[in-house]
Amino acid sequence: MLTPALSQSRLLTIFLPATLIFALGLYDDLRSAGPYPKFVIQAFSASILFAGGLRIDKLPVLFGTRHLGWEVGLPLTILWVIGITNAFNLIDGLDGLAAGSALFSTLVVFVVGLAGELRFVPLLTIALAGSILGFLRFNFNPATIFLGDCGSQFIGFLLSALALKGSTQKAPTAIAVAIPVVSFGLPILETGLSVLRRLISGRSLFTADREHIHHKLLARGMSHRQVVIVLYAVSAIFALLSLFLLWPTGSTLGLVLAVVGIGVWIGVQHLGYLEFGEIRRVAQRTIEQRNVFINNLSIRRATEDLKAASEYGQICRALETAFSSNDFDGFELNLDPYRSRNREDLVFVEPDQQRTQYRWSKPGCSLLLDDWSTWKVTLQLVTTTNRYCGLLEIYRIYNVRPLMLDINLLTVHFPAILADAIERALSTAGTVEVIPQAETAMEFSAAQAG
């Protein structure tokens, strides 16, 4: 005869949807199910939990202590169940990893159930823990049996359901929400990282890859067993931190979340994900946006000055002013006397007697621009009437500091405006031999070859 703690309705509320999840996983193992049918069945199973009273009815972070209506509570419950169910499935990439991580989480739910005086939660979780422990003996590397999707999804679903009931007892609302989140820390972290990585890189959320946490640790030279043991330790730390929240003081929640946040941040940095390095670069560029504005404005002002330039000296001074106040270190302007040729008929020649050269660099950079420590952008100077005037080569010394400039300002309209200014200047002078003289102490050379 069933005790009140294990009444038939309570068992059906959990085991009926859990059976659906197990059947879904078994079908996925044998035939492979698509992501959307899986989400539909998981959402339906979560709805059964909600109807049976296992639900999210408060969310203090967003709604304070107010009880949530079904129109908010049902989607949140579905999201929680789907997330945790698939999180344990996602970390099932190494022998013993998912089962071992689930064991630590199960023990936390067991203790929480005891503290909340819920008899059916400890009974179910201790049975689940015993099953996982017996299974883990044969699942640890080298494994002879495996969870499969049916096992990992079943465990994840059961834990998500039991956490909904156990974490709502005898604890402040914010603490009740934080306990299951922290106790499932490793699978939640893995899922969050996977979703963020794929969103940032523009890949499908359902695309498989080898950039999970355990793959990253394997790539660092650790053995299979070492990776699993390290992640067991991570799961144990998450479990221990979540248990501190059962007896909260005024600053316990903040301290636990701070420790978790710092630990996750340090760990992710050491894993070396390229996507998060790109986020860091964008954030740094946002902080330094003022420098980008200054450098961009120098090019825009030079562009406006070139539109009004009619002499070769004005052109050179406009270029000097532009590049003396941005992140490039020098430039070289090479004019081609055969400027009447159309672009499609152009045949490039090496600099010789047929070219007029003007070179400028920032103080102290003249020698460095001639060795292998520089990179350059070469702009073909073609007028708006499709006539070729020469080349502008812009140099920068290799530096760890990023280029604080929108390069499109140099590659879109700037070359044509500079070419038009050169054509006007040469037409006015009637010869390519009009060369300005150095007027500053900056490294400067202007020469007519030949």
Image (cartoon, rainbow, N blue to C red):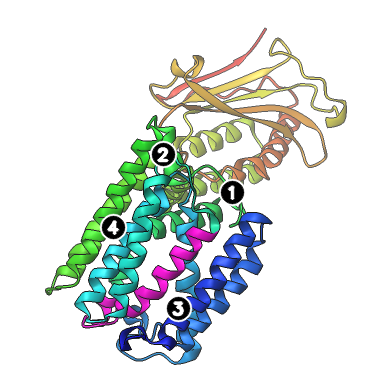
Q: CA distance from mark 4 to mark 3?
A: 33 Å
Q: Decide: few, some or many residues near mark 4? Use Cα within 10 Å; few <14, some 14-19, many ≥20.
A: few
The amino acid beneath tag 3 is Ile
For label 2, count other residues whose C-alpha is less than 10 Å away and answer few (under 14), some (14-19) or many (20+): some
Q: Position of residue 250 (x, y in %)?
A: 12, 74
Work out whether mark 4 precedes mark 3 in sequence or the reverse, and give the earlier one: 3
Q: Could you tell me residue 235's position as x and y percent?
A: 30, 54
Say which residue label 3 marks: 14
Q: Horizontally, is 10 left or right of 332 in the view?
A: left
- Using the rendered image of the protein, determine whether residue 10 is visible from the camera's viewpoint: yes
Q: Amino acid at mark 4?
A: Gly
Label 1, on which residue? 208
From which residue to which does the magenta span run? 150-176
Q: Earlier in the sequence, mark 2 or mark 1?
A: 2
Question: Gap between marks 1 and 3, in whole Å?
Answer: 30 Å
**Could you tell me how far apart the alpha carbons at marks 4 and 2 are, in whole angstroms?**
31 Å
Task: Identify the element where label 3 is drawn.
Answer: helix
Q: Which mark is residue 261?
A: 4
- Name which of mark 1 and mark 3 comes first in the sequence: 3
Snapshot quadrant of residue 6 = bottom left
User: Callout 3: few (<14), some (14-19), or many (20+) C-alpha neighbours within 10 Å?
Assistant: many
What amino acid is at disc 2? Asn
The mark closer to the camera, 4 or 3, is 3
Whether residue 185 appears in this view of the structure is no
Frontmost residue, 331 versus 181: 181
Q: Provide the secondary structure element on which disc 2 rests.
A: loop
Q: Position of residue 394 (x, y in %)?
A: 56, 29
> Where is the N terminus found, in terms of image quarters?
bottom left
Per the image, label 1 sits on a secondary structure element best described as: loop
Q: What residue is shown with label 2? A: 141
As displayed, is residue 441 above or below residue 93? Answer: above
